Amino acid sequence: MNRLFLKTSVRNNQGFSLIEILVALTLLAIAGTFVAGKIFESLEEGKTNAAKIQLQALEGRLKEFRRHCNFYPTTDQGLEALINKPSGGRECKRYLSGGYLEGGEVPLDPWDQPYIYESDGKKINISSGGPDETPGTEDDISLHEGTKPSGGGTETEGAGEEAPAQENTEAASEGEG
C-alpha cells in the first residue's frame, strides 16, 4: 500500500504539462476578452448617457439666459455667453451676475471635446461629436433626436430634420417666458 501511495504522490508532483497550461491560458484570454469587451461597452454607454444629461443641463441654463435676456446666445456668442455677458450682438440688460454656469467653465463632453452650439437667437441646438469625436457622423449625440451639427455651416446628412426639433425648443421656451 505504501508503494501505491508513493507512485501517486510522485505522479502528482510532476505538475501540469505545457499543453494543459496553454489551454488554460487560452481559455483565460478568451474569457478576459469577453469581459473586457462588456466593460468597455458599459463605459461607452455611460459616457453617452452622461453627454445626454449634460446637454439637458445646458439647455436649462440657456432657457434661464433666455428668460433674463429675451433671446438665446447666437452661434457666434456660443456657450461662453453662459459664463461672460456677451459683448457683441444684442445686449442683455438683465444678465445674471456671475453667469449661468457654476465654476466659470463650459463643460466638455465626456470625450473631452467642446459641445457644438448653434443658435440664431430664437432656436437652439447643442450636440457632441460622440465617441468618434467627429461631428456629423452616425454616433453624434444631440439635444434633440434627429438633429446633427452643421459642422461650421456645412450641410450634413440629417440637416433637413433639424427644423421640427428646433420648433419644439422654441415652443417649450415660449411657454416659460
Image (cartoon, rainbow, N blue to C red):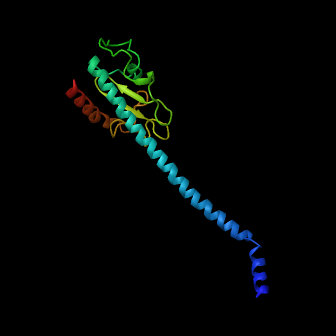
The C terminus: image quadrant:
top left
Asked if residue 133 is positioned above or below residue 174 in the image, the reply reads: below
Asked if residue 46 is positioned above or below residue 90 in the image, the reply reads: below
The image position of residue 114, as x and y in percent, is 47, 29
The image position of residue 74, as x and y in percent, is 35, 21
The N terminus: image quadrant:
bottom right
Is residue 76 something one can see in this rendering?
Answer: no
Asked if residue 84 is positioned above or below residue 138 in the image, the reply reads: above
Total numbered badges shown on the rendered structure: 0
User: Which of the two residues, 160 or 110, is positioned nearer the viewer here?
Assistant: 110
Asked if residue 130 is positioned above or below residue 66 in the image, the reply reads: below
User: Which of the two residues, 147 or 107, is positioned nearer the viewer here?
Assistant: 107
Residue at the extreme left: 175
Is residue 15 something one can see in this rendering?
Answer: yes
In this picture, residue 77 sits left or right of residue 1: left
The residue lying at 32 percent from left, 15 percent from top is 95
In this picture, residue 115 sits left or right of residue 9: left
The residue lying at 38 percent from left, 37 percent from top is 53
In this picture, residue 80 sits left or right of residue 63: right
